[in-house]
Image (cartoon, rainbow, N blue to C red):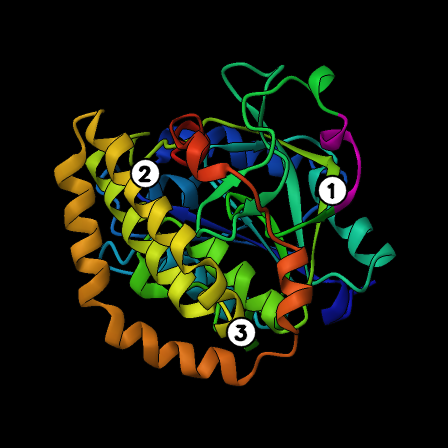
Amino acid sequence: MRRGADERVAIVMVDYNQGHFFERTLGLLREQTRRPDRILVVDNASSDGSPDAIEARFTEVEVLRLGRNAGFARANNAGVRAAEDCGWVALLNADAYPAPRWLEGLLDAARRRPEFASFSSRMMQADEPELLDGAGDLYHVSGLAWRRDHGRGLTETQDALEEEEVFAACGGAAMYRRDAYVANGGFDEEFFAYFEDTDLGFRLRLDGQRCLYVPGSVVHHVGSATTGAGSDFTVYHQQRNMVWTWVKNMPWPLALLYLPQHVLANAWTALAWARRDRGAVVLRAKRDAMLGLPRVLRQRRQVQARRRVGALALRRAMAVGAAPTRLPALLDRVTRR
């Protein structure tokens, strides 16, 4: 029986010279207890032959070739746009290996909890499968964001085994109601990569949408497979996009209240990365963040004009406290996509 659009789900994956991961990941998608209705791989001009190899080996997969490296954000948006006959889109990194019930668990949660528009997976570390890579994303009032419980064992935290609301979903293994994703503009393509999932999660919250962490939907994640944890590319895009996310989305009452913490978080970040010989990269990122503010402020006016959630309700969804003073420990949590 043909499923209606509300029941159909498309998997969207991005490829940039990641052919060595796709053989395993696409094979695991064939073993899902609930098979996806469509699988779209969006290729960012890979030079490793992976698009041709995927088409030859996995005939059920649709390969969209962008012709250039347009970035993680733009590629995901292209895949979501192409999945117009599906009510749900699940984003999956090539290096995130899904357990058999991964997709079934997400769709089951969506049926049971219709008040949520996005769903976050339980991510375990592929190289140390007893350790968590993340149990949903947290967002601090200062602008810092990180994956909850990263690096902890399941016996150390009960949170990772309980279905509960989180601020946002990590885009490496997440499912969104497609209409909510599209209506809120999808990923900001100027971000290129990093923080684009936090930024979208923030805008979804401003629109009254919520995110549910689903512990039964498990992937084993390699992390930073393309860009490298702590590389200049990773540090630059995270530090630039951190500023843009906060400026674009934080409502005025909270922005005025927490601006000192935002400044402190940026200062602590620069200092922490400088101690890891990345100070010049961070300074370039912050400079470019400032140069991009006219565009971001125009976006801000549009985002805030459609806000449906009060500042107090939004504040309750955020983390508070002394996160900026623990920044060195947090760096390892935010550099593994």
Q: Which mark is residue 14?
A: none
Horizontal arrangement in the rendering, residue 100 relative to residue 267 (left or right): right
Neighbor class of circle 3 (other Cα within 10 Å; few <14, some 14-19, many 20+) is some
Q: CA distance from mark 3 to mark 2?
A: 31 Å
Q: Amino acid at mark 1?
A: Val
- Residue at image location 61% in from the left, 70% down from the top: 311
Residue identified by numbered label 3: 184
* Residue tagged 1: 214
- Binning the other alpha carbons within 10 Å of mark 1 as few (below 14), some (14 to 19) or many (20 upward) gives many
In which image quadrant can residue 245 be found?
Answer: bottom left
Q: Position of residue 248 (x, y in %)?
A: 41, 69
Q: Residue furthest right?
A: 112
Residue at 45%, 83% (x, y): give it: 302
Q: Is residue 159 magenta?
A: yes
Do residues under tags 2 and 1 come within 8 Å of each other at their CB atoms? no
For label 2, the residue is: 268
Q: Nearer the viewer, mark 3 or mark 2?
A: 2
Label 1: state its secondary structure: strand
Three-letter residue code for mark 2: Trp
Can you say which quadrant of the picture contains the C terminus? top left
The count of marks equals 3
x, y percentage for residue 212?
A: 72, 50
First in sequence: mark 1 vs mark 3: 3
Q: Quadrant of residue 42?
A: bottom left
Tell me where the magenta segment starts and ends, as one range: 158-164
Q: Earlier in the sequence, mark 2 or mark 1?
A: 1
